[in-house]
Every structure is written in structure tokens, then in C-alpha cells.
Amino acid sequence: MRPFGVFGGMFDPIHYGHLRTAHELHELLRLERIAFLPAGDPPHRAAPLADAATRLEMVRAAIADDERFLVDERELRRAGPSYTSVTLEELRAERGIQPLVLIMGMDAFAGLDRWHRAGELIGLAHLVIALRPRAALPASGLPAELLALHGCDDPARLAERPAGLVYVCRNTQLDLSSSAVREVISAGRDPRYLMPEAARRIITARGSYARTGARQE
């Protein structure tokens, strides 16, 4: 059974770093599809700068022409904090024994100790870690423990079981972040070619990020 990808995040805004990572992981892991899940109320990060409706519209526009990708709105609709553990529990109930692949950047993985019920995630999905510029493999804490106990070097193994493995992907590392895109916009410059044109047009029309500060993500 082909695994199903789960790609959560703020997408504040979505950019080519997100999309290139999704494209490469879909190919490498032979995923059925990848669901993009914009976070509503992230419990371990500052609140997003664009409102939920704008971020959702940008994600929809960015992936509209790629049938491998879909948008899942559940974390925006759910009241309270956007806990990944709850999302994975729901997806597991919906998809039975189909392998689930939770996609995260190395920086997010390194901060896993701060996540709600972080130790339970490996029982609900495989964790696939995308390399990020200047982000190193964690040497301590829960992430290091998961790598030691559940690390996997063969991506084909992810299709053999519903959950329980950690795979570090040697993906293309684009030195691009949502905070960098916001800095470009807040400086009055054009984010063209940093993100899909459809998403850029939404930002231009709404004036999003025009005078915001930067936040790393």
C-alpha cells in the first residue's frame, strides 16, 4: 500500500521550499498523495501573521495544478490548539493500516521535545525529516532517541508498515523560508519567483505582510 503524506505547517506564506520538498518526497517515497495541513493555532510557535482564510487560499492556489497534492482544512476548523497528535489520530482512524508519513523539516524535528504528546507520534506515523540549511541532526533529547531506535536508511521500508520509522531525506536544500519571503515583502520588494505566482497575486491583492516583522520558520 502506497504511503500517504502529511505536510503540516504555518504556510505563512507557502513558498517554493515547501513545494520542492513535497515534490521530491512524493517521488522518492512513492507516496499516494500529500495533504497540506495549514495550522490553525500552533501551540509551540508564535501565531501566524496572515489570517487563516488567506493562508488557506494561498495553499489552495499554490497546489491547484498538481493532482498529487491536496489541502486538508481540519486544523483550521478544529477549536483549540492544532496538535499534530490529534490530526494523526484522526487520519489513522480514516485510513486504517495505510502507512502515514509525517513530513517535517530538520529544524522542526530538532524541537520535537516541545510538541504535545511528541512520544506518541512515532506510533501513529513514520517521521520523514527534510534537511534544511544550517540545521544539524539533533544529538540529544527525544529526536536523538527516535533516530537511534527507529532510524531507517531505506525509504522503501516505509510502505511495509503503517508507522514506526524515522527517515532522513537527502533532499534539495533551498535556502528559503517563510520569514525570508515576509522580509522581502515588508521591505517593499516583489516576492516573484520565491513562490507560485497564484499565491503571490493573493498577497499583492490583500497587502499581506506589507509592514510585518520577521519570524524564523
Image (cartoon, rainbow, N blue to C red):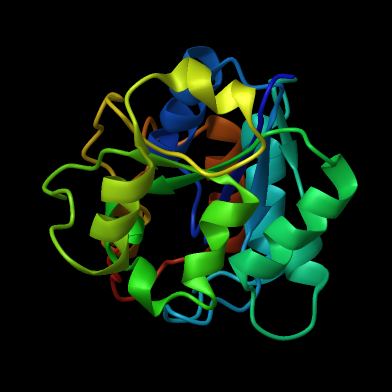
Give the side of residue 74 with respect to residue 83, left or right.
right
Taking the spot 60% from the left edge, 47% from the top edge, the residue there is 125
Taking the spot 76% from the left edge, 33% from the top edge, the residue there is 98
Q: Which of 211 and 162 is in front in this view?
A: 162
Q: Quadrant of the C terminus?
A: bottom left
Q: What is the x, y in percent for residue 6?
A: 62, 43
Q: Quadrant of residue 215?
A: bottom left
One can see residue 189 in this view? no
Give the side of residue 142 with respect to residue 199, left or right.
left
Q: What is the x, y in percent for residue 131?
A: 26, 38
Q: In this rendering, is residue 45 above or below 149?
A: below
Give the side of residue 169 with respect to residue 202, left or right.
left
Q: In this rendering, is residue 47 above or below 14?
A: below
Q: What is the x, y in percent for residue 61?
A: 69, 38
Q: What is the x, y in percent for residue 102?
A: 55, 45
Taking the spot 27% from the left edge, 42% from the top edge, the residue there is 176
Q: Nearer the viewer, residue 15 or 116?
A: 116
Q: Which of 186 and 109 is in front in this view?
A: 109
Q: In this rendering, is residue 104 above or below 198?
A: below
> Residue lying farthest right?
94
> Residue lying farthest front?
149
One can see residue 215 in this view? yes
How many numbered dots are placed on residues in this image?
A: 0
Q: Quadrant of the N terminus?
A: top right
Taking the spot 73% from the left edge, 29% from the top edge, the residue there is 64
Q: Quadrant of residue 42?
A: bottom right
